[in-house]
Amino acid sequence: MDSPAEGSEGRLSRQAKDEEEGEGFRRDRGSEDVDEIESQSKPLLAPAETEITVDFDNGETVELPADGLKWWNRPSILILLPPFILYATALGAAAVPRVNMVLTLICQDYLNRKEREARGGDFTPIQLVLGADNPECEIPEIGAQAAKFTLYTHIITGTLSAITSPRLGQYSDRIGRRKILMIGAFGACLCETTLILCLKFPDHISYWWILLASAFEGSVGAFALILAVVHSYASDCTSFAKRSSAFSLFHGFLFLGIAVGPAIGGFAIDKTDDITVVFYGIVCVYLIFITYVLFILPESLSEEKMKLANEKFEEESLKSAGRTRWFDHVLKIVNVFKPLNVLWPEGENLTKVRVNMILLAALDFFMFGIGFGSITVVLLYSKVEFHWTTKFASYYTSMVNAARVVGLFIILPLIGRLFRKKPKPGDPIGGCDSLDTFIIRAALTTEVLGAIFYFIARGTPLFVVGGIVAALGGVGSPTIQSSLTKHSPSNKTGQLLGVIALLHSLARVIGPAAFNGIYAKTAKTYPQAVFIVLIALFMVAWVGSWFVTPHIAVDGVDDEAVERLFAEERGELDESEPLVGRS
């Protein structure tokens, strides 16, 4: 047996060795993390046949055999991409027909009411073709009513989604990602089915039932939950270093699907003269999505991880049982702001870090809220002012999203390759760099220019140019989110992305409420007022972007984050933490 002195010296020696190795690991990771070009040139996933090599502290090396699973049984983002692209395409295909459907149903109700109020044959009855382009509906009064009704749908969907998304995302830790994906797709399928019933039986089913469709969509988390769970699945089956590349891949294909979807929808409407066929196709896509997830997509979480998550949940439930009142449970459920504390890291001398994180989160909230909130108003405005057909509006939406895809797949990587300086080994990692802040400010500049084109346009060509210019500002959102993660320890990346998803859900309520409300009030008198507000808000965001300080981050390297990286190399890392905020 070693003497106490020898034992103490041994422990000190091992500690010094560990610190030396840890310091070398930090330097290596610092160089690797900032080398984004090199990291994105490597594959996201190792081949299925690759054996895992584990190095133990005593110098022994053991090669573990592969798990023997065929590639189609192995969780992979490549297997998840096909249904996700279908889902994104369905989202894009539904955008314009939904606006046209709401406008037509409200228009028919408006004309029927005018007919009932008319006396002595002063009003000629008009029967609209539901879903078609009806010139009788292209008047400011109906546009204002449609904007107000669309506002109600966004409030219902966004509010319910903000409440349910974090909870369902946390639940995916305990029952698996696949089941939550199917629940989300099933809710979307119920939503589209309700819309079809409103279109097919307008005399028996009021257009107010569309609010029920919004409730179906929001109660299962809507789009925010699907995207968050997709990110969680990607986290489960990609390495820690390559996770950001996986997220970028899904975002790129998301906008690609949204760009292609409206063109497909416009083509189908042009060939059939029936808007209902688009909603039938969307329902079929959701059913294919559910079938694919049920029978083909492998579960990314192991039984052990789900069992551990259930045990932790039961343990936490037992600790709080008996000392929490029932209304405290209710308050905990509806408190959607609790996860935001990740934007206020604890510690001393972190004022600039907190300011940066709050500003970046606010900028992302602004850009998503303004972009999402103005979509419906832009389509309604163009319908009333320029008399766009559903077909042309679909093609316009495709062009705008295609410009966004060009920005994400070509312009943004090209800027990084040409202007981002390649770091030297040992260089510190310090928050977002000067190129990040330049891209954010440039993106906001294009958003301002696009809004100015909207405002001054008195014809279709300039209005379309405005949409394309504004779409190039889409490079700002992924840059902002990437910059946010650079201000936080790596072990909190999932929680931080969850807060972004939560903010997007809230923006889905506030953005449409503001813009649809403004347009509803000014459609008869000065419809361009909404674009003045758009310009002013983007200018505020642009000014705010100049207060973001580059090369600011939490001092030092988080020891827990380093241990997390070591654990991943050893294959011991539990990555079941959901990407949506916990309650």
Image (cartoon, rainbow, N blue to C red):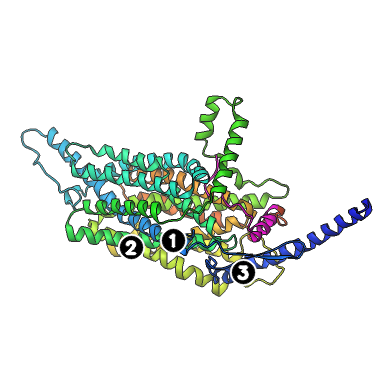
| Nearer to me, 218 or 447 | 218
Q: Is residue 216 left or right of residue 347?
A: left
Q: What is the crowding at mark 3: few (fewer than 14 residues within 10 Å), some, or many (at least 20)?
A: some
Residue at numbered disc 3: 35
Q: SS for tag 2?
A: helix
Labelled pair 3, 1 in contact (Cβ < 8 Å)? no
State how far apart marks 2 and 3 are (Cα).
33 Å
Q: Residue type at mark 2?
A: Val
- 329 in relation to 212, above or below: above
Q: SS for tag 1?
A: helix
- 86 in relation to 333, above or below: below
Q: Quadrant of the C terminus?
A: top right
Q: Which residues are magenta?
A: 560-583
Q: Residue type at mark 1?
A: Ile
Q: SS for tag 3?
A: loop
Does label 2 or label 3 sit earlier along the sequence?
3
Q: Is residue 358 left or right of residue 140?
A: right
Residue at numbered disc 2: 260
